[in-house]
Amino acid sequence: MLLPAPRGPITDRLRGELTRPPHLFDPPPDEAYGDEEDLHLALYVCYELHYQGFDGVDDRWEWHPSVLALRERLERWFEAELARLVPRPPAPAPEEVPRALAALVAADQGPSLSAYLRTRADLGRFAEFVAHRSLYQLKEADPHTWGIPRLLGRSKAALVEIQADEYGGGSPERMHAELFRATMRAVGLDDTYGAYLDRVPGATLAVGNVMSLFGLHRRHRGALLGHLAAFEMTSSTPNRRYSHGLRRLGGDAGARRYFEEHVQADAVHEQIAAHDMCGAFAAEHPGLTGDILYGAACALALDRIFAERLLGRWRAGRSSLRQPLGSPPQAPLGAHPQAPLERPPQDPGGSPPQDTEGSPPSRSLPRPIPPRSPAGRLATCPPEPVSESETGPESETGAECGPGTGTGSETGAESEPEVGAEPEVGAEPEVGAEPGAESEPEAESEPEVGAECEPEPAPPIDYVLPLRWQDDTGLEELTAYLRRLSRHARIVVVDGSPSPLFGRHARLWREIAEHLRPDDDIHVANGKVAGVLTGMRRARNEHVIIADDDVRYEIAALGRMSALLKNADLVRPQNHFHPLPWHARWDSARTLLNRGLGADYPGTFGVRRSFFARMGGYDGDVLFENLELIRTVRAHGGREACPLDLYVRRLPPGTRRFWSQRVRQAYDDLAQPVRMAVFLAVLPAVGAALWRRRPELVAAGAAAVAGLAEIGRRRAGGRRVFPATAPLFAPVWVLERATCSWAALTARFLFGGVPYAGRRLRVAAHSTRRLRHRATGPPTPLTSP
C-alpha cells in the first residue's frame, strides 16, 4: 500500500518525513491540529505502521520516537473528542457486566444502514458501503488481537476462541478478510489492501482508529474488550440484511458468503464476548468494569456517525466517498475476479482527490443490476432516494453500520429479543411488552428472489421438540413460537398426538419444521424419551437443543447454548416461569431451592449429537428422564456445563395439571435417596415439634427454607427473572413435597409405580453406578437410523 495523499499540514508533513530514512523530527505546531480529516488520516498512517506498513517506508519508523511523539499528540486529541462525544456509562458490578452491555446496545438509537441496504440501495451505493468497510475488514480482527497478550485465564481463552474463528480456524481461504475480498470483487471493487484509503472520509477512519487506540495501549484493555463485545452483539441481524440486499442485487452465494458467515458465527461470538470474555475480565478486574462499557459505547457512537454520514450523503444525491466510484459491473454478481469499478489512483506524489460535494447522481449512483424475479425474468429495480422514514428512528430503533463485525444495536425490525410470541419475563411489569411485535412487517417486506438463487444456509443448531397432546389448547401460540424460532434453528417436532391433532399440526408446521411420528422401532415407556431418540436420529447439526413444548427460547439463549456446546457435551440452562400465576410462584420455590443447593433440573438441554450417538441414547423406561440423561452423560465421561445465569422461559401449566403432577414429581425423588429421606422426615419432625409445643422450631425451619430459596434467587442475577415473592412459597412447597413423598412411597411399594400414559413406571432414574456399568458394554441401538 502506498502512502495516502495529504489532507492537511499534518499528513503533508508526515508523508514527507516517512519517505526519508528514519530520523528525528519535531511534531507540527499546535495551530496545525484543526482539520479532522487531516488528523484522522495522520493517526491512521501512524497506526498502519504497526500492521502492513507502506510501500517505500522503512519498517524502522514503526517504533521511532518522533513518530510516537506525533502519535501521542494525535491520540490525546482523539481521546478528548471521544470524551466529548461519548458520555462515560456508570460502572456496573462485575457480575452485571453482560447484562449492562446488552442494555447499552439495546438503548442505542440511530439510523439503520442495513435496513436501507437490504431493501433500497442500488449496486453503486452497496459498492460504496463495501469500499468504506474495506479499510477495516481487510485486516479484520487484527486490532483486537493486540488484547490477547494483555489477558489471562478465561477472558484470554474466550478472546482467542473468537479470533480463531475470525482467522478461519487455520484455513486461509476461510479467513474473514479473504471472504470480504470475494465480496469486493463481486461488486466490482479492487480488493487490494488499502486500495480505497484516499477515498474514505475521516468518519470511516475513526471507526478503525479507535480499535487501534484501544488495542495498542494496555491501559485501554477493558475498553478494547467492550468494543469487541459491541461489535459481536450487533452483528448477526445486520449481516443477514446485507446478505438479503446483495442477493436482491443478483449476488450469488460466493458474493454473500462473508455476510452469511457472520450471521451464524456472531450469534455465537456475542455470547462468548459478553459472558466468557467481558464477564470473566470484569471478575478478574472489578475496577475496570466502567472501561468495558465505555469501549462499547465508543463503538456504537462512532458507527452511528458513520451511518449518518453515508445516509446523509445519499439523501442529498451525493457519493459518500471523497471521490465517487465508476460504473458497476453489468453482469450477474459473483465472487469471481472481475474488473473493478474504478481502480483508485496510486500516484505516489499525487494531489488529494477532490471531495465531490456536487457530484451528479448519475455518476455516484449508477443503475443497479436488476434482481431476478420469481418467474426467472429480470425485474426492474431503480435506485430510490433515502428518506427519514426509511432510515430514522421512526422505523428502526437501532443504529448500526458494521457488516459482520460492525456495530449497531439493531433493536428494531428483525432483532426481536425473544423467539417466542410471549413477552420477555422480568419482575418489572413493563418488561411484558412484546419485543418482537415490530419485526413481522419488515420480514414480510423482504424482496422476493428467484428460484435460481441459492437457498439460505442451514441454521447452525437443531431444535428437537417431543410432543404428545390430547387437545390443541395453546396451538396458536406454539405455532407462532416455532415460526419465529425457525429463522434461527432447524426444528424437528416428534409428535405422538392422536391422528386428528397430528394432521392439524402437520398442516400448520410443514413449512417451518420437520414433523413426524416417533419411530416404530423405539419401544420405551416414556413417550418423551421416544420423541427425543427419534428427533436425535433426524438431527443434522452437531449442536442440538432438546426442549419440552412449554419452553420458550430467546435468540440470545440459542446462541449461548451453541457457544457452550463447543466445549461441553451437555448444557443445563435454568428455567423460569412467565407469566406467574400463584401456582407458578409456588413451583418456582422448588427451582430456587435447587439453585440454592446447586442447580435446577430444567425442561430443556443442549447436547452434542456425536456424543449422544456414541453413548447410544439413554434409557426411556424411567419417569425422571431428565436426571437419567444427565447421569448417562456423566457415566460416559461427558462434559457437563451448568450456567446458572442462562435463563430460558417456561410457560406455567394450568392449575389442574399443576395438581396432577404433585405425586409424580415427588416420585422422582426416589432416584435421589438422601433427598427422599429428608422429605420423608419433614412431617414427623413438624409433628414432633408441635407435640412438644415448640412452634418456634417449625418457624425457624420455615425461615431457613425461605432463606435458602432466597440464596437461589440471588445467584447469578436470578433476581431479574424470579419474583421476590417466590421464596415465601418455599416452606409451603416443602410441606407439599413432604406429604406427596409418602404418597409416592406408597405407590412404589403397594402399586408398583406411578401411572404414566396408561401404564405404571416403577423406576424414577437409574443410579450413576449402574449406568457406568452399562457404559462399559456395547451401546444400545436406540440412535441407529
Image (cartoon, rainbow, N blue to C red):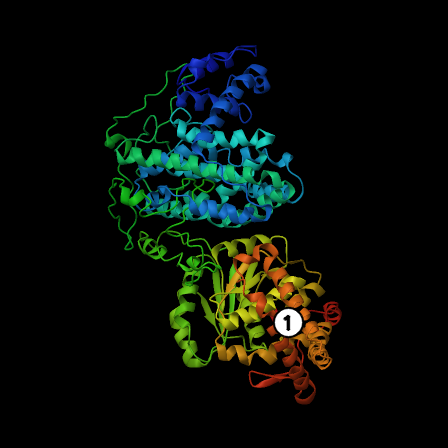
In percent of width and height, residue 515 lies at 46, 70
Kindly indicate the quadrant of the structure image that contains residue 124: top left
Task: Give the percent coordinates (x, y) of residue 36.
Answer: 40, 23
Q: Secondary structure at mark 1?
A: helix
Q: Vertically, is 173 above or below 477?
A: above
Q: Is residue 128 left or right of residue 156?
A: left
Nearer to us in this view, 411 or 688: 688
With respect to residue 290, does 761 lie above or below? Answer: below
Residue extending farthest to the front is 693
Q: Residue at x 71, y 74 (%)?
A: 678
Q: Residue at coordinates 47% horizontally, 15% vertically from top-left? A: 15
Residue type marked 1 = Pro
| Callout 1 crowding tier (Cα within 10 Å): few <14, some 14–19, many ≥20 | few
Q: Position of residue 772 (x, y in %)?
A: 74, 68
Q: Is residue 485 visible?
A: yes
Please name whichever residue, 85 or 559, is drawn nearer the observer in this view of the structure: 85
Please tell me how many numbered marks the rendered image carries: 1
Q: Is residue 499 above or below residue 727?
A: below
Residue at (58%, 29%) from the top-left corner? 217
State the quadrant of the C terminus.
Answer: bottom right
The residue at which mark 1 appears reads as 781
Please say whether residue 524 is visible from this viewpoint.
no
Q: Position of residue 251 (x, y in %)?
A: 37, 44
- Nearer to us in this view, 429 or 452: 429
Quadrant hosting residue 218:
top right
| Left or right position of 242 against 172 | left
